[in-house]
């Protein structure tokens, strides 16, 4: 990428384009100076026509107007020049409107945007070439859409057969012609990896008839023999047979046996992954226990509803309502785990298929997104480690591009990324030379393992010591930048060349792009090419809605499509580094699988964390969710998107529907009884009527269909049949994706592709345009395209929309964790993190995208919908949970209970319910590989988070949706290395601590009062007290980690908690004195003493 290594800043709306850190002669250039004359309406540049002249809309006054504004004025406006008011005449290549004179050429209104019969690759080539010609003045192609004759006269690519037998006649289509390609013809100049040919060279095409001599068409000629020899050579290379050892003298097979076993022995053609179902010895008992638990629940509610407590009717009714809600929540959570599976990948087969020896790698390109906001809460050193692990990943360097989104426009992040790019020139070759893991230097140098294991290189120890010294110096430089950034100058930050930092105002600054690595001349210390590294800070202006992280990710989608346009995307948080250098290859085993890969929208990896205490006090690892729930979803339609560590298919993010799988033909009715035929006919009629209804009322599936190539390799011929609907209309695409022609063109390329080595000025201005603050206005961004807006948890909403379009996702769990990150380990930060997640779920529940009523008829399975419903209603469980945890204290203080006197039948039902709950958990731990400690911590924090974060999130969500009171977004702090578990005992006061603290106090007071009452009343009162004490102790045990968090490291309760405890205890004591339960309500009861005191 030829940007000169300079920072590019600009605003499309203000027609600003600035190059910073340049020489004095080229420091500031406007768009007009870079690309010629600019449009006086939209500010865009004027394109260059095929004749090399600027586009002129008005022949009277030559008022500068671009073709887009010209066509819009003719279509929607008054069809006149804004300056001289002369009516616009139709220019060839533009659509007709009413009033145009009739013309006799094929360039008419009916065929203007008829793309249905064209090759989509040729269409997109022409669109992108025309856009680049507008600036460079190239003579490659015309700026208009090619006519049919031009497209069909272009030479075919290697995927189209040269000869096809057809009958001679007038109705022979162009794709059945025998194309004779002149030997002197070469390919045209290419500006992106897609196939392109020069249409100016005439080509012959003739129908071929089998009755005639085929030598007439070149079959058997020298050129044909050369092509046949080349085809045979390619075929032999594709059929790479892996020789297996053993049998027949070391595996030497004769030709007959080799041909017979060829399909089985060809590892390159085997599936790249496979499903591993849970063994039946584990899953079948689990399913039986679930069914039994359902039956026991029915018996339990039958007893509870038919045996009310007359003297405590309010407590009984409240408890029954809470229990019904818990049962519904359990059903929504349990049944999506009915079909759990695991998966296995084959990286060796991936290499055999797409990385042949002596040839360029055919692996797909991947654009990697790293998002950061505040460098003070997200330390630059952590972000730098994430970027370094990406640049050193085990993947072809020309296939990787890393985009870092700085949504806080911090110069600290920019300078830290500049230092990171310099250190990467040393770190990347070191990682690949010695194959080290992990490739984030902070975690590599601090891991407590034998780093000499499996290392045989004699210079490893010496180079490792030198690299560790280099990294320590790098850390000192980063820490120096952080220390300098603590105090902001009054005039704002200034760059090294004296230019003011464009992002001094966080809420009012232009868009900024800096290409650090990947452009010409920047290589590592060993002279090897490095992956592309781009800094991006989108434009922000007052009065615009920027949509936080989701808006930043959508900006990265667009700018990456303009610059590199990889077909797959990986997004990671700034604190999630790549722990397994082969993680991208693991994802490609699913995405690039020719059998099942076409319907996969994303591959989700589990989240794993460093720096968590051994006991995981606050369930930061969340192992139950990632190792049990996600495996269950993978067996249905795929896991939900969790916000990081996810590889996407770019076309799925564009809002396209999943490809429809053609079902095999069913049985005919000839072999079935007549009554079966009648049933079949009736069902078919019903299906036809349903299809007609769906045609009348289209729901989710739009007229836009993705290009899905069906590859069929037979006799060396590769036929790619691509279908595209009428949404290829330029106007519809711009309404959906925005007004950038380059970006709109890139959306039509299913396999990606775009200019990588050099960026002409037009692409730089396009990149600035697509990150402008007003680009998404009146488009479908955030509604149907990209990351979906409307919730702070945009990840759940985005994945839900993809599943509604019929896509499926995959859960990949390699043995070595693919990604690792940092988690907030102190209580307050953990509760704030859970609060943000729960708030996003409440926002989705109150929006039109709620899974309860949205997305029917789009291909989502019912169990998958159950999971999404559960993910948005769980914050509502906080109300019944808080009430249910308060009931034990009320029962102990009042002497009442929610259950009447328990009979033998009721005792059996209660015991069976508790046993079924325990057995379900044990079996889940068995097939999920989860320890009992992790399972119990998850249960405890479900109560802690439910009565604190979920409750506050529910009220904040209701205030935001109903009253319009928005809450501020709190970025979770990512701790740097300040000592092991340094923040575990750090106490930070927050209002989230009040509800669980109150529950703890009233339940402890209730236990004390209940025991005192039993001691005072004698032995008979201990029986009824047992159930109430068990109920209260259940609450206290679940809140025990919260209590430890309040006490801190020194087992000292903080002053604020002590004050709250004394206040609440005083209130409860006064209430207790007022109630006075030890005294009868009828006054003192005097009884005659049996002792004779007179004697």
Image (cartoon, grey):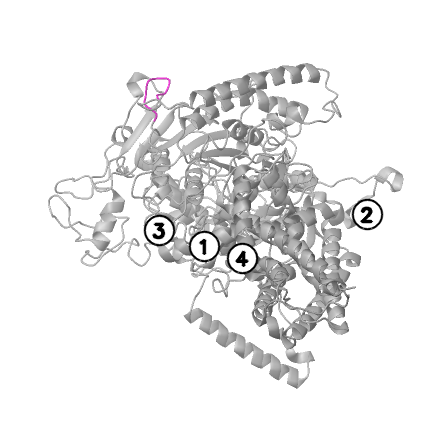
Q: Is residue 446 above or below residue 1014?
A: above
Q: Nearer the viewer, mark 3 or mark 4?
A: 4
Name the residue that disc number 4 marks: 1071
Q: Residue furthest front?
A: 1095
Where residue 153 appears, x then y in whole percent? Answer: 41, 47
Give whichever of discs 1 and 2 has the lower sequence position: 2
Name the residue nearer the viewer: 930 or 111. 930
Q: Nearer the viewer, mark 2 or mark 4?
A: 4
Name the residue nearer the viewer: 554 or 739. 554
- Residue 430 visible in the current orientation: yes
Work out how far the residue at label 3 is from the one at label 4, CA to CA, in angstroms.
61 Å
Give whichever of discs 3 and 4 has the lower sequence position: 3
Name the residue that disc number 1 marks: 955
Work out how far the residue at label 1 is from the one at label 4, CA to CA, in angstroms.
29 Å
Where residue 887 appears, x then y in whole percent? Answer: 60, 61
Give whichever of discs 2 and 3 has the lower sequence position: 2
Left or right of 467 on screen, residue 562: left
| Residues in magenta, as a range | 494-501
Q: Is residue 567 above or below residue 482?
A: below
- The numbered mark at residue 779 is 3
Asked whether residue 495 is drawn in magenta, I would say yes
Q: Nearer the viewer, mark 1 or mark 4?
A: 4
Q: Identify which residue is drawn at 76% across, 68% down.
A: 1090
- The numbered mark at residue 257 is 2
Work out how far the residue at label 2 is from the one at label 4, CA to CA, in angstroms.
91 Å
């Amino acid at each position: 990428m030829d940007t000169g290594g300079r920072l590019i800043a600009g605003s499309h709306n203000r027609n600003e384009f600035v190059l910073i850190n340049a020489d004095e002669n080229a420091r500031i250039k406007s768009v007009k100076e870079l690309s010629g004359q600019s449009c006086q309406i939209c500010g865009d540049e004027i394109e260059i026509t095929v004749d090399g002249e600027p586009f002129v809309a008005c022949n009277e006054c030559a008022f500068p107007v671009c073709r887009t504004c010209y066509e819009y004025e003719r279509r929607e406006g008054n069809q006149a020049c804004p300056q001289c008011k002369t009516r616009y005449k139709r220019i060839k290549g533009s659509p007709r409107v009413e009033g145009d004179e009739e013309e006799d050429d094929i360039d008419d209104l009916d065929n203007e945007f008829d793309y249905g019969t064209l090759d989509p690759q040729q269409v997109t080539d022409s669109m992108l070439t025309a856009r680049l010609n507008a600036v460079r003045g190239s003579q490659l192609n015309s700026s208009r859409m090619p006519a049919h004759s031009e497209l069909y006269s272009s030479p075919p690519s290697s995927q189209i057969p040269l000869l096809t037998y057809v009958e001679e006649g007038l109705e022979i289509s162009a794709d059945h012609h025998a194309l004779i390609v002149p030997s002197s013809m070469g390919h045209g100049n290419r500006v992106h990896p897609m196939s392109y040919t020069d249409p100016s060279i005439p080509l012959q095409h003739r129908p071929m008839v089998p009755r005639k001599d085929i030598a007439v068409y070149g079959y058997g000629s020298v050129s044909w023999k050369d092509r046949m020899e080349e085809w045979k050579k390619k075929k032999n290379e594709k059929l790479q047979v892996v020789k297996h050892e053993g049998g027949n003298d070391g595996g030497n097979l004769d030709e007959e046996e080799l041909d017979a076993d060829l399909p089985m022995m060809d590892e390159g053609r085997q599936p790249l992954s496979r499903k591993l179902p849970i063994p039946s010895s584990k899953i079948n008992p689990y399913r039986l226990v679930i069914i039994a638990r359902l039956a026991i629940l029915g018996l339990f509610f039958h007893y509870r509803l038919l045996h009310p407590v007359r003297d405590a009717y309010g407590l009984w009714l409240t408890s029954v309502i809470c229990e019904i809600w818990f049962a519904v929540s359990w059903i929504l959570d349990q049944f999506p785990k009915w079909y759990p599976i695991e998966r296995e990948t084959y990286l060796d087969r991936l290499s055999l298929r797409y990385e042949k020896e002596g040839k360029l790698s055919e692996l797909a390109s991947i654009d990697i997104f790293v998002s950061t906001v505040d460098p003070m809460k997200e330390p630059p050193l952590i972000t730098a480690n994430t970027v370094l692990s990406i640049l050193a990943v085990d993947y072809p360097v020309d296939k990787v591009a890393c985009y870092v989104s700085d949504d806080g426009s911090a110069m600290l992040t920019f300078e830290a990324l500049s230092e990171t790019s310099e250190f990467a020139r040393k770190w990347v070759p070191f990682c690949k030379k010695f194959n080290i893991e992990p490739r984030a230097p902070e975690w590599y140098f601090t891991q407590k393992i034998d780093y000499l294991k499996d290392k045989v290189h004699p210079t490893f120890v010496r180079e490792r010591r030198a690299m560790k010294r280099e990294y320590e110096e790098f850390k000192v430089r980063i820490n120096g930048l952080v220390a300098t950034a603590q105090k902001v100058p009054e005039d704002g930050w200034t760059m090294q060349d004296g230019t003011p930092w464009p992002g001094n105002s966080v809420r009012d600054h232009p868009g900024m792009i800096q290409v650090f690595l990947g452009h010409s001349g920047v290589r590592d210390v060993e002279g090897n090419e490095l992956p592309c590294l781009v800094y991006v800070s989108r434009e922000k202006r007052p009065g615009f809605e920027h949509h936080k992280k989701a808006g930043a990710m959508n900006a990265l989608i667009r700018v990456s499509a303009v610059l590199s346009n990889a077909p797959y995307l990986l997004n990671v948080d700034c604190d999630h580094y790549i722990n397994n250098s082969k993680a991208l290859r693991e994802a490609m085993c699913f995405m690039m699988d020719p059998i099942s890969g076409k319907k996969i929208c994303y591959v989700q990896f589990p989240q794993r964390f460093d720096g968590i205490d051994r006991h995981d006090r606050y369930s930061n690892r969340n192992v139950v969710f990632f190792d049990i729930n996600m495996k269950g979803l993978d067996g249905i339609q795929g896991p939900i998107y969790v916000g990081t560590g996810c590889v996407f298919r770019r076309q799925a993010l564009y809002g396209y529907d999943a490809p429809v799988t053609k079902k095999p033909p069913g049985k005919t009715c000839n072999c079935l009884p007549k009554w079966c035929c009648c049933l079949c006919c009736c069902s078919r009629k019903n299906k036809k009527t349903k299809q007609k209804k769906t045609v009348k009322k289209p729901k989710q599936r739009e007229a836009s269909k993705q290009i899905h190539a069906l590859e069929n390799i037979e006799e060396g011929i590769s036929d790619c049949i691509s279908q595209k609907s009428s949404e290829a209309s330029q106007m519809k695409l711009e309404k959906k994706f925005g007004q950038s022609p380059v970006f709109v063109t890139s959306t039509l390329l299913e396999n990606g592709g775009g200019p990588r080595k050099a960026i002409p000025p037009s692409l730089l201005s396009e990149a600035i345009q697509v990150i402008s603050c007003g680009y998404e206005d009146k488009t479908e961004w955030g509604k149907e395209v990209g990351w979906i807006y409307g919730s702070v948890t945009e990840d759940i909403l985005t994945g839900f929309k993809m599943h509604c379009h019929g896509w499926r996702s995959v859960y990949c769990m390699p043995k070595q964790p693919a990604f690792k990150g940092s988690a907030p380990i102190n209580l307050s930060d953990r509760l704030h993190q859970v609060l943000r997640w729960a708030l996003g779920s409440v926002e989705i529940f109150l929006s039109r995208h709620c899974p309860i009523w949205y997305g029917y008829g789009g291909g989502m399975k019912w169990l998958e919908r159950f999971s999404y419903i559960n993910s948005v209603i769980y914050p509502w469980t906080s109300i019944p949970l808080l009430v249910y945890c308060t009931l034990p204290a009320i029962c102990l203080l009042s002497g009442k209970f929610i259950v009447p006197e328990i009979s033998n039948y009721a005792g059996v039902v209660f015991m069976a319910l508790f046993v079924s709950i325990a057995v379900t958990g044990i079996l889940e731990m068995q097939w999920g590989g989860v320890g009992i400690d992790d399972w119990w911590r998850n249960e405890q924090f479900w109560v802690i988070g439910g009565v604190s974060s979920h409750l506050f999130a529910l009220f904040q969500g209701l205030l935001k949706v109903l009253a319009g009171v928005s809450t501020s977004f709190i970025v979770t702090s990512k701790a740097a290395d300040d000592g092991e578990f340094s923040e575990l005992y750090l106490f930070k006061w927050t209002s989230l601590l009040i509800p669980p603290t109150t529950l703890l106090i009233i339940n402890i007071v209730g236990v004390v009062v209940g025991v005192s009452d039993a001691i005072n009343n004698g032995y008979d009162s201990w029986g009824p007290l047992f159930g109430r004490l068990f109920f209260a102790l259940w609450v206290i045990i679940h809140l025990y980690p919260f209590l430890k968090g309040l006490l801190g490291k020194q087992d000292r309760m903080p002053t604020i908690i002590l004050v709250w405890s004394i206040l609440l205890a005083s209130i409860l004591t006064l209430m207790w004195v007022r109630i006075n339960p030890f005294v009868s309500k009828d006054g003192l009861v005097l009884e005659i003493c049996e002792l004779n005191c007179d004697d």
